[in-house]
Image (cartoon, helix red, strand yellow):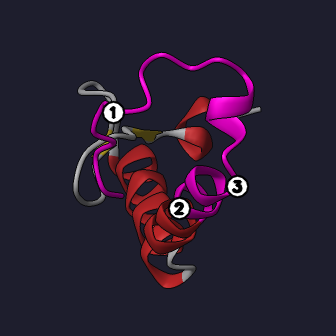
Amino acid sequence: MDPRNANGAVFLGVNGIVIKSHGGTDEVGFKSALGVTYEIAHNRLMDRIKNGLKRYEKSGVSEKHGDDNKNDEVASA
């Protein structure tokens, strides 16, 4: 496996798409990180995460599990 083809770590919990590429990568690795970014945007991953969190919140699952942090804000995705 060529690590350049798996370049691009995703940061969650921010309001938008953030991809961290390894600073020492070459053009192949950077292109891979851009590809990750494109796929996230094209497949509307941020909206899917946001909607999933809303469904989770509405289902009351956190209350069923005794989550004392139910008033904490969740960063929009």
- If you read the primary sequence from the N terminus, does the residue marked by circle 2 or circle 3 appear first? 2
Question: Between tags 1 and 2, which lies in front?
Answer: 1
Q: Secondary structure at mark 2?
A: helix
Q: Is residue 72 magenta?
A: yes
- The residue labelled by disc 3 is 59
For discs 2 and 3, the disc positioned in front in the rendered view: 3
Helix, strand or loop at label 1? It is loop
Specify the segment rendered in magenta: 52-77
Q: Secondary structure at mark 3?
A: helix
The CA distance from mark 1 to mark 2 is 14 Å
- The image quadrant of residue 1 is top right
Q: Report whether 69 appears left or right of 52.
A: left
Q: Are marks 1 and 3 in contact (CB under 8 Å)?
A: no
Q: Which residue is mark 2?
A: 54
Of callouts 1 and 3, the N-terminal one: 3
| Label 1 Cα neighbours within 10 Å, binned few <14 / some 14-19 / many ≥20 | few
12 sits to left or right of 17: right
Q: Which residue is mark 1?
A: 71
* First-in-chain label (1 vs 2): 2
